[in-house]
Image: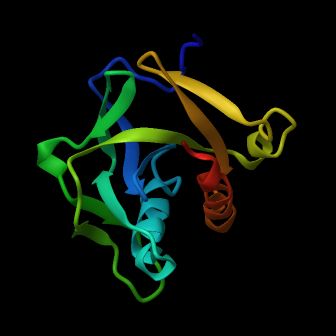
């Protein structure tokens, strides 16, 4: 098992988690990297693509290994809240949206500098260990369109 350098010792991690067609997707990255924007994109476009999607938590989530699965859950103080940064005519701010309190994680997405994504190592199908659970791991660039497309490409391979 490889230790994860992004995993802090605190009970919550700086990440956003959403569920898409039953798959929990945990998105990690620096502040302002686009975690919330990616989650909102998949949540807001799901119905038009015949999918279901809901927020688990934005900015802070608990993760815990339970019965061989990594479970992400939202702290009650931020349940249903997500940050929307300014995008054109839409105002920035905190919004209240539908959420589910927890979900098993199927995919860990890390938003990283472009050079890491497009390096030979970045193009490999990665696995990562969190809380002793092995998960599919995807590196995506900060560029929103590219990140969303890479997530779309890996979705059919999630078990």
**How far from the left and from the top, in percent, is residue 71?**
32, 33
**How far from the left and from the top, in percent, is residue 127?**
63, 28
For residue 35, above or below residue 61: below
For residue 69, above or below residue 73: above
Q: Left or right: where does residue 31 sit relative to residue 100? A: right
Q: Left or right: where does residue 60 sit relative to residue 130? A: left
Query: Which part of the image, by quadrant, shows the C terminus?
Result: top right
Identify the residue at horizontal 28%, vertical 70% (top origin). 93
Q: Left or right: where does residue 105 sit relative to residue 137? A: left
**How far from the left and from the top, in percent, is residue 124?**
79, 36
Identify the residue at horizontal 53%, vertical 53% (top origin). 33
Q: Residue furthest front?
A: 159
Classify residue 121 by image quadrant. Answer: top right
Q: Left or right: where does residue 126 sit relative to residue 43? A: right
The colour scheme used here is: rainbow
Q: Nearer the viewer, residue 9 or 134?
A: 134
**How far from the left and from the top, in percent, is residue 2?**
59, 13
Q: Residue furthest right?
A: 120
Q: Residue furthest bottom?
A: 89
Q: Nearer the viewer, residue 158 or 107?
A: 158
Identify the residue at horizontal 46%, vertical 82% (top origin). 48
Identify the residue at horizontal 80%, vertical 41% (top origin). 123
């Amino acid at each position: 098992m490889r230790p994860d350098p992004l995993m802090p010792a605190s009970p919550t991690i700086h990440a956003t988690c959403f569920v898409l067609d039953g798959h929990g997707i945990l998105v990690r990255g620096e502040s302002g990297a686009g975690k919330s924007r990616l989650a909102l994109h998949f949540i807001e476009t799901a119905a038009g693509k015949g999918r279901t999607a809901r927020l688990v938590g934005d900015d802070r989530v608990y993760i815990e290994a339970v019965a061989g699965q990594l479970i992400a859950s939202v702290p009650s103080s931020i349940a249903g809240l997500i940050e929307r940064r300014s995008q054109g005519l839409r105002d920035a701010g905190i919004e209240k949206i539908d959420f589910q309190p927890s979900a098993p994680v199927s995919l860990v997405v890390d938003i990283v500098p472009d050079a890491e994504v497009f390096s030979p190592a970045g193009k490999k199908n990665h696995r990562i260990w969190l809380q002793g659970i092995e998960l599919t791991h995807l590196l995506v660039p900060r560029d929103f369109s590219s990140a969303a497309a890479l997530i779309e490409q890996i979705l059919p391979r999630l078990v």
